Image (cartoon, grey):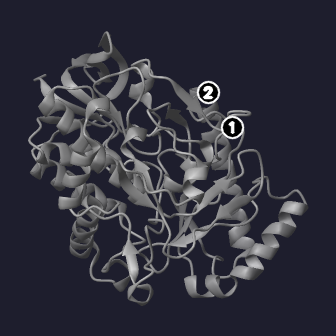
Amino acid sequence: MKEYDVIVVGGGFTGVAAAVTAARQGMRVLLTERTNCLGGAACNCLVNPFMPFFTGSKEDGGKKLILSAGIFDEIQDRLIKVTADICGDHPRYQHKPMSTFSEEALKIAFNRMVLEAGVDLLFHTTLVGADKDGDRITGLTMAGKAGLCKLHAFYYVDCTGDADLALQAGCPTHLGRPEDHLCQPMTLCFRVGDVDTARFREGRAEMQKAYKEQQAKGKIRNIREDVLVFNTLSDSILHFNTTRIVKLNPTDPVDVTRAEIEAREQVYEMMCFLRTYAAGCENAKLISTAMQIGMRESRMIDGEYVLTVEDLLAFRKFDDGIAACNYDIDIHNPEGSGTSHYYFPQGEYYTIPFRCLIPRGVDNLLVAGRCISSTHEAQASYRILPVVTTLGEAAGVGIAQACKANIPCRQVDASAVREILRANGAFF
């Protein structure tokens, strides 16, 4: 393999944003992904739709203020174009800010975006180790169909979502709540077809009532408090984000295996329930479950700054802020039923400092995505796809600045990163 300026590990929204941005800054970039497509949790775990990434402006009569802009705005434009070509015109996905989107359109749009930027792409490649010389990563050990191989670069970006590269490089990390290390529940999303969605919507309240009744009778093993369901691009298909697996470690393969097995039993249970108790679902059919269970939270780095819930509640605007967010502090109970929310007032938001992307113990690594340096409560807000995309864009700019100057990432001038991001249309 040839040598690169930057290797980005993980091809989700965060990794695509980091790789494309670094390449546009003149870097020779390799993007590695362990599955067969780009898109990360959106494609592998069916995470859909985009959660809100805007707020009402205090001026302009409450006009929407877009908080996840920059490269995420470009991604939406590309998604709209590809979706129209492969799915036809539909008002549900022909406008911004987007909500529901097509995973198949996303895979194509991301391939084009990455290759047009000059990024080399490597699928079916899993990180298994990192070599270090002092405080620098000197190479990665990857596993693929040909066995083990070594990849080398001057700088690296961890976009795995689970801080896998940071862990392999010896960076300190933490997991879940400090008192018991429990993370938010894992969820296996699934799609249900042949639904009369108009009747389903009309009878939704009765369905929720029946769900609670069956749960109280012990007929529902799922401990989630209600049925969480979203629309899709098809008028006859529903998207369910309603299974709930708690008290298992999302970084332990034994626990994740148990979670996958239990979640599929919950899907079976939900299908039996829907066909019996949900209006419009009499002829419903299970179309698909996600390729892997979705994880709201897992391992996070201990970085140069730890973002806290106090920062969020104070709407802090950091001097080195590189992304903005006001998605609610959305905590699905890590040990049982219930979901807590804190909704930000209209027009308010907080920013995320560049220092949260800088792990301790390694000079030539940035970490982006839901595994940046923060507390359990703070992560519950910024973990959504639009925001982690903006974190990836910031990492792409930051790693390019470090590489050009041949300096440790912690010495990168955050004001220079902000200036480039602002020129690219980012908001913070």
Judging depth in this view, the residue of 319 and 153 nearest the camera is: 319
List the single residue furthest toward the front: 319
Q: Quadrant of the C terminus?
A: bottom left
Q: Is residue 137 left or right of residue 236?
A: left
Residue at horizontal 49 percent and vertical 56 percent from the top? 316
Of badges 1 and 2, the one in the foreground is 1
x and y percent of residue 156 in the render? 27, 30
- Along the line of sight, the residue nearer the viewer: 424 or 392: 424
Going from N to C along the chain, the mark reached first, 1 or 2, is 1
Q: Which residue is mark 1?
A: 182
- Residue annotated with mark 2: 254
Question: Which residue in the rendered view is the most extreme toward the top?
Answer: 133
Look at label 1 and name its amino acid: Leu
Does residue 340 show up?
yes
Mark 1 and mark 2 in contact? Answer it, CB < 8 Å.
no
Q: Quadrant of the N terminus?
A: top left
Q: Tag 1, which secondary structure?
A: loop
Query: At which x and y percent is residue 310?
Result: 61, 51
Q: Amino acid at mark 2?
A: Val
Identify the residue at horizontal 24%, vertical 76% (top origin).
84
Residue 246 against residue 363 in the figure, above or below: below
The residue at 21%/26% (across/down) is: 407
Can residue 16 be spotted in the picture?
Answer: no
Looking at the picture, does residue 78 appear above or below residue 34? below
Residue 112 sits above or below residue 372 on the image: below
